[in-house]
Image (cartoon, rainbow, N blue to C red):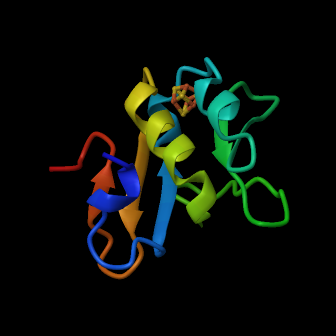
Amino acid sequence: MDVRQRIPGDGGELEVWIDRDLCTGDGICAQYAPEVFELDVDGLAYVKNADDELLRDRGAATPVPLPLLTDVVDSAKECPGACIHVRRVSDKVELYGPDAE
Ligand code: SF4
């Protein structure tokens, strides 16, 4: 099943954030979705905004562009630190990641 079909609602209002305390720095996320994730010089992964700027605030979230949804979800599934969280913007319910039901 296409991942987009499993998202409640219109599927266009998702965001992703990283719990950097658990990041192993392997870079899998940045390989899957370099438009959204990037490793910084500290060896940890950060999410980026639409202007390609790293969001450094703890728990900072960035919108998930729909064309990149599959790559972002795959990142969350493969993340060895289990620290990528994909949630609905409207109610902050996690849909993919360690806290998803
Ligand atoms: S896949 Fe997870 S553990 Fe690996 S760099 Fe990205 S956020 Fe960190």
What percent of the width, then of the height, locates residue 74? 46, 36
What percent of the width, then of the height, locates residue 85? 40, 49
Q: Residue at x 68, y 33 (%)?
A: 30
Q: Quadrant of residue 34?
A: top right
> Residue 97 versus residue 21: which sits nearer the camera?
97
Q: Residue furthest bottom?
A: 90
Depicted 82 relative to depicted 15: above or below:
above
What percent of the width, then of the height, locates residue 51? 85, 65
Q: Residue furthest front?
A: 1
| Res 49 seen here | yes
**Is 85 positioned to the left or the right of 7 in the image?**
right
How many badges with numbers are in the image?
0
> Residue 78 versus residue 47: which sits nearer the camera?
78
What percent of the width, then of the height, locates residue 70? 50, 46
> Residue 57 versus residue 52: which sits nearer the camera?
52
Q: Residue at x 38, y 78 (%)?
A: 10
Q: Quadrant of residue 42?
A: top right
Q: Residue furthest left?
A: 101
| Res 61 seen here | no
> Residue 56 versus residue 72: which sits nearer the camera?
72
* Quarter occupied by the N terminus: top left
Q: Quadrant of residue 87?
A: bottom left
Q: Residue at x 27, y 58 (%)?
A: 6
Depicted 79 relative to depicted 97: above or below:
above
**Is 88 positioned to the left or the right of 68 in the image?**
left
The image quadrant in which ligand 1 is located: top right
**Is 54 positioned to the left or the right of 87 in the image?**
right
Q: Residue at x 77, y 66 (%)?
A: 50
